[in-house]
Amino acid sequence: MALSFGQVAIGSYALAAVAHLWLGARLDRATAAVERGTPVARALRAALLCTAAWAGVALATQLHPQPGWIGAALVLDAARYGAWFVLLVLMAQPRRWLREFARVLVLLAALLPLLALVGQPLPNLASSVALGLPVLGLLLLEQLYRNAPEDLLWAAKPMCIGLGCVFAFDLYLHSHGVLFGQSKPHTLVVRAAVHSLAVPALMVALRRHALRSRPLQLSHQMAFHTLTLLLVGSYLLIISGAGYYVREFGGDWGQALQVGFGVAALAALALALSSGAVRAHLRVFVGKHFFRYHYDYRTEWLRFTVALSGNPGDGEFGSQVVRALANMVESPGGTLWTAAADGTHFVAAAHWNSPRVSAREAADSAFVNFMRERDWLVNVRELRESPERYDGLAMPAWLASDATAWAVVPLPVAHEFIGFVVLAHPRTPLPLNWEVRDLLKTGGRQAGIFLARMRAAEALLEARKFEAFNRMSAFVVHDLKNVVTQLSLMMKNAKRLQHNPEFQQDMLATVDNALEKMRQLMLQLREGEAPAGGRHGVDLAALAQRLQHGAQSRGRTLDVEVAQPVMARGHEQRLERVVGHVVQNALDATPADKRVWLRVERAVGQARITVGDDGCGMTADFIANRLFKPFSTTKSGGMGIGAYESAQYLRELGGGISVHSEPGRGTVVTMQIPLFETERPADAFMAGSA
């Protein structure tokens, strides 16, 4: 069986009356002892009782629809709004004009039903006042939520949400009534039930001890948002009243004209709210008439810092600086001038919403020297009309031809003049008084430090690139030295063995190998470091045999022992240079009549290459502090880079190198290299059985 509107309304009002009475009765239990009896607690109790009384009288109107009951319900509706406003005013403590406005609006809302009872109805004014009450309630909630201290905000947040839902619902209800002449019955009958939803939120707020009044600190941002909300609410009230008269006097087309007028008015409101010029005018108005100082320096400085520290994209740090300074004074654009690479002149290096300038300004011009020596912010209009205030300074031609230029902000860094920013005229007229000058000068110094830091970071990055290139060049030169040594030794033997066919074949192979090594080194120097790993494994047995053959070609003996075939991960040419360097050091440190050996084996999942000799050995101090440091060597003709490169590359592969040596008894170098496993034995067995 479907419920009628009357039955739903009766249940809604009954629920609201019971819920608010219940919370009013439990108020002493739900609040802390220090909060009982305070003005805020008394205001909350009055608001709950007024709401319960309103719901009870409204319930009576549903049971006995008499004019007296209806008028009493309307008066109590205004009274409960007044009680909630008193509570919010005590907690937020707004400005006096807002408190007086709330008092007048509530009194007017209570008097209008009484006038209707005595035969003087004012339906249009009553509708506008009914719409103004929830707008004012939302305004007070916004002030409380935005400016409450952190500890009070956590406690008051549920109350703000609950009452916000109440005021937002009434705003929707009365807006529909003003625009279309009557409220929706479905919406009207559930109004009291929706208002009852605030009771649980209020209970949570009470348990969090929210009934504490705190002084409100009015900030520029809060005043701006409050004034904006008030103006928007007033605008909506005006267009609502105008729409009513358009519908009443528009004849057959009245309703269509009302809808069209409403859409146009809302579009105009959206256009005004999105306009930067309108926002700029409003901020200047707030700064002039509500505060002693024009700027909220804490907010401005935080916003300026965030603008500089953001990611500009594509390295456009210059435009980021211009935008940060321009936003301080509501300027729509500007240009950054910085010194050219040779330092002889300044050029327009970055733009933001401004045309590009191809002119130049000499670094020693009178205009630049004036800003460098005086650290003055230049008012372009003042310079054009009264140059004597700037010691007769002549305006540059490029600045005189720029009709949009408003101010020139210097960017000093310590004793260096890094550049200047030319800002366009603000969206709203703004005098360049002492406060604006100080703000822009301080922002200019910070922007100069920011640009200097960015330049230093770029220079450091470039220096690191050159350092990496120089280090790679040192590796290449070291390997070329080994190739040159090998070719020099071969040329010495060529005079003695030039008619030996075996020597000739060996010489051709050696020259071809040297050419291939030099080609690889040149490729590495041009394209960067060779890859740390390769797609194919390195056969360490074959590598050991090539090193053994190379030692024989130089008249030395290298004993090679391959315990088992091993494939290691790495780049073949680089790995051969690393092991070859260790072998060459062992041969250089060992007399020809003593032994040098190389062993290849597997060990704990890695390939192990051991190179040992019976040479002169090294001290423990040299191994710990100098062996793997670049440009440290015991050889008279060495560069001290080979051991460093070997250790670095083995670490890149995921391996390592260790040295054990004693002076006069020889050295053992152990290199660990990750294995290159193509397939596991189980996989190979399965593949073979298939």
Image: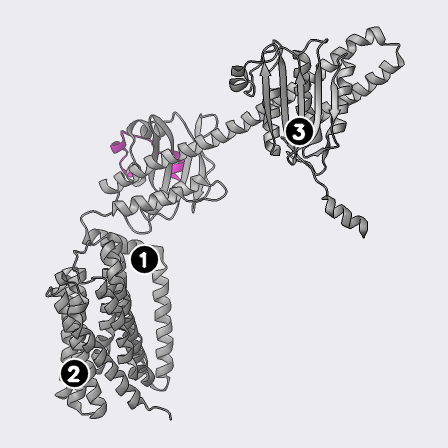
Q: Crowdedness of circle 2 by 10 Å Cα count: few (<14), some, many (20+)?
A: many
Q: Crowdedness of circle 3 by 10 Å Cα count: few (<14), some, many (20+)?
A: many
Residue 335 part of the magenta-drawn span = no
Q: Work out whether 260 lies above or below 310.
A: below
The answer to whether residue 7 shows anywhere in this view is yes
Q: Which amino acid, by three-letter code, is at mark 3?
A: Arg
Residue 389 part of the magenta-drawn span = yes
Q: CA distance from mark 3 to mark 2?
A: 99 Å
| Residue that numbered label 2 is attached to | 113
The circle drawn on residue 278 is 1
Q: Work out whether 368 lies above or below 483.
A: below
Q: CA distance from mark 1 to mark 3?
A: 76 Å
Secondary structure under the numbered disc 1 in the rendered image: helix
Q: Which amino acid, by three-letter code, is at mark 1?
A: Val
In the rendered view, does 467 fall on the left or right side of 185?
Answer: right
Q: Quadrant of residue 378?
A: top left
Q: Which amino acid, by three-letter code, is at mark 2?
A: Pro
Identified at 36% across, 87% down, the residue is 252
Highlighted magenta segment, given as a residue range: 384-402
| Residue that numbered label 3 is attached to | 608
The answer to whether residue 249 shows anywhere in this view is no
Q: Earlier in the sequence, mark 3 or mark 2?
A: 2
Q: Work out whether 466 lies above or below 183.
A: above
